[in-house]
């Protein structure tokens, strides 16, 4: 079974600064996807960024980028130029890419990010 | 907005009752997954439906059941409600194997 661990329950960042959220995972599979989701107080889970395990290049989406270390099973999210609207819970998630596998997402416990003005 | 809508947004039930939660998936999405998110926790996978058939189930008892309809909308039914069933229930829809889009969830309180 796959597990996702987010060991930091809370983090805080000054507006316009950079913050890194950590995530580790465990799997015996070689082909999978990793995601970071944002959940604001509105409750809707919003996809921030996605990484395919077979790609060595780290994914980037505007101010969001990841540091994917497959051997270490580490997947951190870097938010640059933090904005007040980035304040939310952030979840790291895993999904198998095995042929025939369902689309089940395995989530970590999440981290609450606050942004100081 | 993702196009995935859930109803109701909130409800309160009494222990032992039954509840039905509904999810209207985004157009063209034939896969629906349900998750339970306890307060302060990450979502836990309940089950997934693909073309009206259950296609994977998490560690939840049989009193959690579901349906998917020909238009790919879905229901989650929970029988014999327990206090620990109080949670946010999230529905996610996707084309098979592709990105999941989440609804805003149903907040269920069991008293």
Image: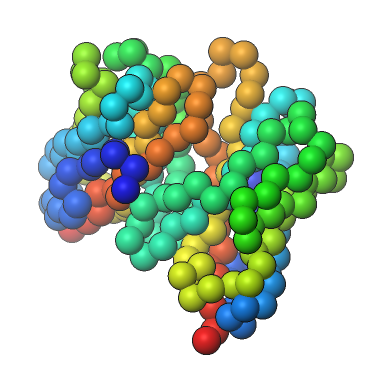
Residue shown at 59% from the left, 72% from the top = A82
Image coordinates of residue B13 in percent, x first then y, are 14, 51
* Front-most of residues A34 and A9: A34
Q: Viewed as shown, does residue A80 lie left or right of B87?
A: right
Q: Viewed as shown, does residue A30 lie left or right of B14?
A: right
Image coordinates of residue A11 in percent, x first then y, are 61, 73
Residue shown at 67% from the left, 77% from the top = A17
Residue shown at 45% from the left, 20% from the top = B96
* Front-most of residues A106 and B2: B2
Instruction: For residue A33, say whether it is visible.
Output: yes
Answer with the quarter of the image where residue A9 lies: bottom right
Total residue callouts: 0
Q: How is the image coloured?
A: rainbow
Q: Quadrant of the N terminus of chain A?
A: top right
Identify whether A112 is placed above or below B6. below
Residue shown at 47% from the left, 66% from the top = A88
Q: Residue furthest right?
A: A71
Instruction: For residue A21, say whether it is visible.
Output: no
Image coordinates of residue A55 in percent, x first then y, are 77, 33
Q: Viewed as shown, does residue A22 lie left or right of B102?
A: right
Q: Viewed as shown, does residue A63 lie left or right of B77?
A: right
Image coordinates of residue B87 in percent, x first then y, are 32, 52
Q: Residue furthest front?
A: A62
* Front-most of residues B24 and A26: B24
Answer with the quarter of the image where residue B39 lies: bottom left
């Amino acid at each position: 079974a796959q597990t996702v661990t987010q060991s930091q329950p809370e983090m805080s960042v000054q507006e316009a600064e950079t913050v890194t959220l950590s995530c580790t995972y465990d799997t015996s599979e070689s082909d999978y996807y990793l995601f970071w989701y944002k959940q604001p107080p509105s409750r809707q889970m919003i996809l921030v960024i996605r990484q395919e395990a077979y790609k060595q290049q780290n994914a980037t989406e505007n101010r969001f980028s990841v540091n994917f270390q497959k051997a270490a099973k580490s997947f951190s999210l870097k938010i640059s130029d933090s904005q007040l609207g980035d304040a939310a819970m952030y979840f790291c998630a895993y999904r198998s890419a095995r042929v025939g596998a369902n689309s089940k997402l395995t989530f970590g416990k999440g981290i609450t990010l606050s942004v100081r003005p | 907005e993702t196009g995935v809508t859930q109803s109701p947004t909130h409800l309160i039930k009494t222990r032992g009752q039954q509840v039905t939660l509904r999810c209207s998936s985004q157009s063209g999405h034939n896969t629906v997954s349900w998750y339970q998110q306890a307060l302060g926790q990450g979502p836990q996978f309940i089950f997934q439906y693909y073309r009206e058939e259950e296609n994977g189930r998490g560690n939840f008892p049989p009193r959690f059941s579901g349906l998917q309809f020909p238009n790919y909308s879905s229901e989650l039914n929970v029988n014999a409600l327990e206090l620990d069933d109080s949670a946010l229930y999230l529905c996610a829809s996707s084309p098979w194997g592709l990105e999941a889009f989440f609804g805003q969830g149903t907040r269920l309180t069991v008293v």
